[in-house]
Image: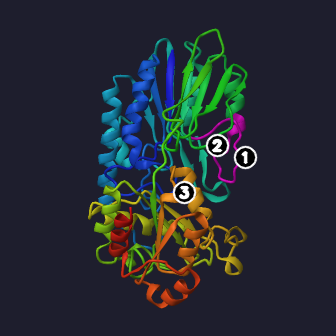
């Protein structure tokens, strides 16, 4: 039996915006998934497994933060269901049997209105494929780690006791290999699970997602444990596995586009350039777009520029708000821009607070403007040509970051721009100074 495995799409289409972590190309995913499934069909796959994080829904849908008002959950839940229906349409259209299961970025109430919650196992080409829909748990000392509890554990133990056919086990979270990152990708009981699975004569393959850049697959006993790299990031990787009764499982790595052309970008500061009142120390209810911003960004979209926001949010490092609130603010920004037909391709936020940091992890400010670090990271992850790119902001540090990255800078007079104009021109003579973002976009498109 030949099985195609793809995982961690983090898609958004009807939902505005992109995944919270930049580099995840959410809005490309429906079309890219269709390409991937066509490749799998050409490669002779008998079935397809999609092991979680089909979407990247706002975290307030499944993990509300007390004291902060989310941005209309009913709107996002409805759009999430529309995106699940879109993904299902792509899967149905491929003409291959498939398995899907939820990940920690999915919204299960909407997902199970679209996909069958009871379609947990099927036998395909003589191999029994079983999915396990586990969750992360945040109770006590086990905080934020995946577990296999009832009823999934009962089904798992029943499968281990059944030796009638070869088996493939699917789950979002990682049993093996051990992931060394700080984030807990492995099950709390992963050692016990690995031992039981590796001593089974009939479990041939254990497939997971969740870790986007995993270590190579490992063999324990007769069982191959594999975590396929995430599909949402360039070059869009997937794997094909061959499962036979009496020989070891083999696999092939594939990618949709190992070579991708670069394109120019327009980087935007957030507070004072896109919105009038910083949501700093607050939540999405304080976020308001400046006049004409949506239409201006849409002009950049139509002209083929990637539009990337770079913002410093040291409010996280200083302990005023959690990182999740910054993400909620950006979801609000995406929604307001989408009402004008505009989109942001990625958001890069610097959270460090230096000596004012409340925890050691937030002391580092090396990626904050005027450092070009995040601009260079965006160029690498999104395949951008910095030499043909621009940075629009309201402070001298924005222009300096642009200069150090090899971009051209534009100062706007909104926000702190009018107060910073003379200082900026003294440090960076010849910098274009425009009244606002719509005027800056007009300048960029004319200069092009």
SS state under label 3? helix
User: Residue beneath label 1, please?
Assistant: 180
Residue 343 seen in this snapshot? yes
Of the two numbered discs 2 and 3 on the same chain, state the one appearing first in sequence: 2
User: Looking at the image, which residue is at 59% across and 15% down?
Assistant: 163
Q: Does residue 327 appear left or right of residue 406 in this picture?
A: left
User: Residue beneath label 2, please?
Assistant: 187
User: Residue beneath label 3, please?
Assistant: 378
Q: Residues within 10 Å of mark 3 (few under 14, many from 20)?
A: many
Marks 1 and 2 sit apart, C-alpha to C-alpha, by 13 Å
SS state under label 1? loop
Q: Is residue 239 above or below residue 420?
A: above
Task: Indicate the quadrant where residue 41 lies.
Answer: top left
Specify whether residue 185 is painted magenta: yes
Q: Position of residue 347 (x, y in %)?
A: 48, 62
Q: Position of residue 3 (x, y in %)?
A: 50, 22
Marks 2 and 3 sit apart, C-alpha to C-alpha, by 32 Å
Residue 72 seen in this snapshot? no
What is the magenta range?
Answer: 173-192
SS state under label 2? loop
> Marks 1 and 3: which is nearer the front?
3
Q: Is residue 46 above or below residue 79?
A: above
């Amino acid at each position: 039996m030949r099985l195609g495995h793809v995982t961690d799409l983090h898609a958004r289409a009807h939902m505005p915006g992109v995944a919270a972590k930049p580099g995840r190309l959410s809005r490309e995913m429906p079309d890219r998934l269709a390409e991937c499934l066509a490749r799998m069909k050409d490669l002779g796959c008998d079935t397809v497994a999609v092991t979680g994080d089909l979407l990247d829904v706002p975290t307030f849908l499944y993990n509300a933060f007390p004291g902060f008002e989310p941005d209309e959950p009913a709107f996002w839940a409805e759009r999430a269901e529309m995106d699940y229906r879109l993904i299902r349409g792509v899967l149905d259209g491929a003409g291959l049997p498939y398995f899907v299961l939820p990940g920690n970025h999915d919204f299960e109430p909407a997902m199970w209105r679209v996909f069958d919650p009871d379609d947990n196992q099927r036998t395909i080409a003589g191999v029994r494929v079983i999915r396990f829909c586990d969750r992360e748990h945040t109770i006590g000392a086990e905080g934020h780690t995946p577990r296999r509890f009832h009823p999934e554990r009962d089904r798992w133990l029943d499968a281990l006791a059944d030796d009638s056919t070869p088996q493939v086990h699917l789950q979002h979270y990682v049993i093996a290999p051990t992931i060394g990152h700080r984030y807990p990708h492995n099950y709390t009981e992963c050692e016990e699970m690995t031992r039981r699975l590796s001593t089974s004569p009939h479990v041939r393959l254990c497939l997971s997602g969740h870790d986007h850049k995993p270590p190579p697959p490992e063999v324990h006993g007769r069982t191959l444990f594999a975590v396929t790299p995430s599909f949402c990031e360039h070059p869009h990787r997937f794997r094909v596995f061959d499962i036979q009764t009496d020989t070891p499982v083999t696999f092939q790595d594939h990618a949709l586009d190992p070579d991708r052309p670069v394109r120019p970008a327009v980087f935007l500061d957030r507070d004072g350039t896109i919105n009038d009142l910083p949501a700093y120390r607050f939540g999405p209810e304080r976020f308001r777009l400046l006049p004409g911003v949506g239409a201006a960004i849409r002009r950049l979209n139509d002209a083929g520029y990637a539009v990337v926001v770079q913002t410093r949010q040291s409010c996280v490092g200083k302990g005023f708000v959690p990182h999740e609130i910054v993400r909620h603010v950006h979801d609000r920004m995406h929604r307001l821009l989408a009402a004008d037909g505009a989109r942001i391709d990625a958001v890069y936020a610097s959270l460090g607070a230096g000596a004012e940091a409340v925890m050691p992890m937030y002391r580092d400010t090396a990626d904050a403007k005027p450092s070009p670090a995040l601009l260079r990271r965006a160029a690498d992850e999104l395949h951008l040509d910095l030499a043909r790119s621009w940075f629009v902001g309201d402070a001298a540090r924005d222009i300096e970051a642009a200069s150090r990255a090899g971009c051209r800078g534009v100062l706007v007079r909104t926000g702190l721009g009018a107060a910073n104009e003379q200082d900026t021109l003294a440090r960076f003579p010849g910098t274009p100074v425009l009244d606002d973002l719509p005027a800056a976009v007009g300048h960029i498109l004319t200069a092009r």
